[in-house]
Image (spheres, grey):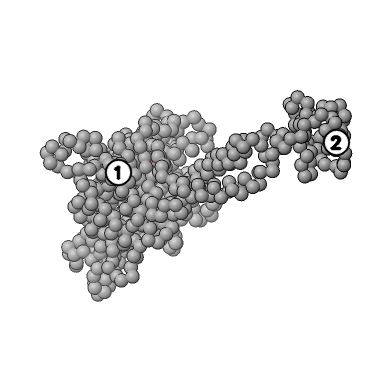
Amino acid sequence: MKEVKNPKKPWIYYYMIVLIVILCLNLIFEPFISGHSAKEVSYNTFMNMMAARDVGQVSLEVNQIIFTDKDGQNIYKTGKIDDPDLVKNLYNSGAEFSSEIVKETSPIMNLLLGWVVPILIFFALGQVMSKKMASKMGGMNTMQFGMGKSNAKIYVKSTAGITFNDVAGEDEAKEILSEIVDYLHNPDKYTEIGASMPTGALLVGPPGTGKTLLAKAVAGEANVPFFSISGSEFVEMFVGMGAAKVRDLFKQANEKAPCIVFIDEIDAIGKKRNGQIGGNDEREQTLNQLLTEMDGFDGSKGVVILAATNQPDALDPALLRPGRFDRRVPVELPDLQGRIDILKVHAKKIRVADDVDYAAVAKAAAGASGAELANIVNEAALRAVRDGRKFATQADMEESVEVVIAGYQKKNRVLSNKEKLIVAYHEVGHALVAAKQTESAPVHKITIIPRTSGALGYTMQVEEGEHFLMTKEELENKIATYTGGRVAEELIFNQVTTGASNDIEQATKLAKAMITRFGMSDDFGMVAMETVSNQYLGGDTSMSCSLETQTKIDEKVRELVQAQHDKAYNILKENMDKLHELAKFLYEKETITGEEFMQILEA
Ligand code: ADP
Ligand code: MG
Ligand code: ZN
């Protein structure tokens, strides 16, 4: 895509500066112009030429003598020496007295050199300067010479642009957006029936799922101008400029219609107004202006507004009502097929071995976003280069999944043998509890090589198919699996370590969600006692029940986790020999695959 610059430039400033400087310069240059091409010679030369009757014209000035030779070809000058007979001698030598020897002093030349040339120089200088300023100072430029101009980037379609083919998965989102593209191409088809296009579409989803990418693809597909601006750009630099910038943006858009306006990270200006006096006035004014402008659109004009956010809950309801952003386009984390497609799209940019099994990589990378998958492919390429290979292999891909999930291998962290043994038992504890509950390979891989993320070892689980629902029993099994690591430590070493902190956190979160959100507790039934506020950004929750209930919930959570802990304890106690055998294997090899695990378990 190509960026097109705003053409408007306030030239009046430059003209004024140029005029003033020219006046000054003219004064400085004046003496040089007269006689500037005269050749300096010694007084002796002058005397000799005079004696040889070789002086043509001569002009006696206050402190110099300017003269030409007989045929007037060359102009000379020399200093003046006190010589009373000078005039007489000159007259005798046949020289002709003149006051206008120097050719350049002709009035036209004078005007040219004194005025026109400096004007041209400064004109050129001004051009260069203004270009530099515009590119260097970006926002500054806006503020100095055009208060409140939106600094939206305008894109026009170019062949190198991003298209829908660059966005893998996300078929629903693409479908909705292609309709908008289609409308911009053939508005008649829609207006004939009387249908009007939605004014705005809001892309919502977790970070890295391709919202910005989708918007760029729309720009690449639609043959219309595309204004792109980030929400935060409205409120930078100067207080009170946001609203003016919105106005300017929409004015430009109206002039260029049909076109697309894309506001990235719209939550920066679209947050709920809280109605308190002395709230964030600046942002509210900007938002109000945006609401007004969106209402002022004539739907048939063909201005479509796209916006992206990962905090849809935080947006002001007025923005979301029909007539403004009435289409909501969910851009969710990719499913298995989506992950495979995304991996393939990005693998096209690097050299890969023919036998890479994308499905296996995609399965291992469950829950990864598009951005993470792009990163995985790139890590694989980097790893191939590091190992001196010409293309990335399956192993590179799998290792980079781990790098993205758990960080790089920490080569220099040396665990003591005792610690290594504890980690081995801990990890096998998780895996064994999981295996005994579901009777299937619970793990893809277990390693006890420390990672830069701080994990001393970890168990990589790969779901066979895709799950969208989970039963109460599955959730309980999951909690039991989380406790398995600690249980193994208790059983074998009769002591506990800090290594289980993350497991404890996860188990508690899950148990709490079962009770407060999923209605899986007999004591509380189907009552929501917790609400998720930021579903796309970490999913923070807030309690919405009385303090007494909270106390009861805490008690129930403790009971639930304890029950699963006891279950895991029994499972491991019954399978002590396998626990020892697997832990020994892991301790020696540092890595165990799912197949090896099942072999030992079933032996
Ligand atoms: P966000 O949703 O946070 O705006 P981006 O659109 O900026 O995410 O995505 C970041 C990068 O991740 C993209 O530049 C692209 O390389 C990659 N990516 C994300 N989703 C996809 C996808 N569906 N297909 C291909 N690449 C994707
Ligand atoms: Mg983005
Ligand atoms: Zn653990």
Label 1 secondary element:
helix
Q: Is residue 154 above or below residue 541?
A: above
> Element under label 2?
helix
Query: In the drawing, what numbered circle is on residue 88?
Result: 2
**Is residue 494 or residue 400 the one in the foreground?**
400
**Residue at 28% across, 63% down:** 273
CB under 8 Å between callouts 2 and 1? no
Between the residue at mark 2 and the residue at mark 1, the CA separation in whole angstroms equals 81 Å
Query: Which image quadrant for residue 356?
Result: top left
Q: What residue type is labelled 2?
A: Lys
Which residue, as the protein is rendered here, is positioned at the far bottom? 548
Nearest to the observer: residue 533 or residue 65: 65
> 521 above or below 167?
below
Point out residue 547 in the picture as x, y percentages from the top left corner.
26, 74
Q: Within 10 angstroms of label 1, few (less than 14), some, or many (20 or more) residues? A: few
* Residue 597 point in image, percent of width and height: 37, 44
Q: Which residue position is annotated with label 1?
A: 255
Q: Disc 2 or 1, which lies upstream in sequence?
A: 2
**Viewed as shown, does residue 536 lie left or right of 192?**
right
